[in-house]
């Protein structure tokens, strides 16, 4: 049985409307994908900015810590030098009076430092 021309016209009209609806749906999906992509890019930019800020804070903290450590090491070195200068004559006198004891102490300190440096 063949369809009547009126039925064919109605089917063609419905198909045309359906094609139009599909094209509209495709356009809407493309627009939505663009918006989602834009949102994702914005979130990625925000995350990158936050990461850069955190990295800058970490760098500043590391720089501050290194400066403080350097200052502390320099102060300690100055203290040791001052102590050595103040006690050099006493140390010389003790070494002259007790050379074997001084030698044993020096060997013990050297062995201790060697063990520390091996680790």
Image (cartoon, rainbow, N blue to C red):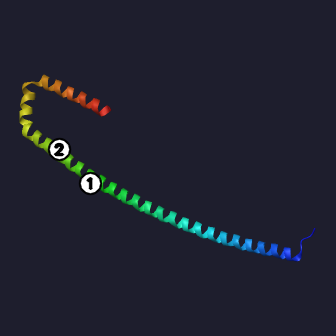
Marks 1 and 2, how far apart at CA:
18 Å
Tell me if label 1 and label 2 are in contact, CB under 8 Å. Answer: no
Q: Nearer the viewer, mark 1 or mark 2?
A: 1
Left or right: 93 in relation to 30: left
Mark 2 surroundings within 10 Å by alpha-carbon count, few (fewer than 14), some (14 through 19), many (20 or more): few
- Of residue 45 and residue 74, the one placed in the foreground of this image is 45
Q: In which quarter of the image is the C terminus?
A: top left
Q: Name the residue under label 1.
A: 64
Spot occupied by residue 111 in the image (x, y as percentages of width and height): 25, 27
Q: Name the residue under label 2.
A: 76
- Of residue 19 and residue 7, the one placed in the foreground of this image is 7
Quadrant of residue 3 in the image?
A: bottom right
Is tag 1's residue or tag 2's residue first in the polypeptide sequence? 1
Left or right: 112 in relation to 26: left
Left or right: 56 in relation to 98: right
Residue drawn at 67 percent across, 72 percent down:
24
Residue drawn at 20 percent across, 47 percent down:
72
Spot occupied by residue 100 in the image (x, y as percentages of width and height): 13, 22
- What kind of element bears circle 2? helix
Residue drawn at 29 percent across, 54 percent down:
61
Outermost residue, right side? 1
Spot occupied by residue 70 in the image (x, y as percentages of width and height): 23, 49
Q: In the figure, 81 relative to 23: above or below?
A: above
Left or right: 32 in relation to 97: right
Mark 1 surroundings within 10 Å by alpha-carbon count, few (fewer than 14), some (14 through 19), many (20 or more): few
Quadrant of residue 53 in the image?
A: bottom left
Quadrant of residue 91 in the image?
A: top left
- What kind of element bears circle 1? helix
């Amino acid at each position: 049985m063949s369809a009547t021309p009126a039925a064919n016209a109605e089917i063609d009209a419905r198909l045309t409307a359906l094609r139009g609806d599909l094209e509209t749906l495709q356009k809407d999906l493309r627009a939505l994908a663009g918006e989602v992509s834009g949102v994702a890019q914005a979130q990625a930019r925000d995350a990158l900015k936050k990461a850069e800020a955190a990295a800058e804070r970490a760098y500043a903290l590391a720089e501050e810590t290194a400066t403080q450590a350097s200052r502390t090491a320099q102060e300690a070195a100055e203290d040791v030098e001052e102590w050595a200068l103040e006690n050099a004559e006493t140390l010389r006198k003790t070494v002259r009076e007790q050379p074997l004891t001084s030698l044993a102490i020096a060997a013990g300190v050297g062995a201790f430092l060697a063990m520390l440096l091996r680790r």
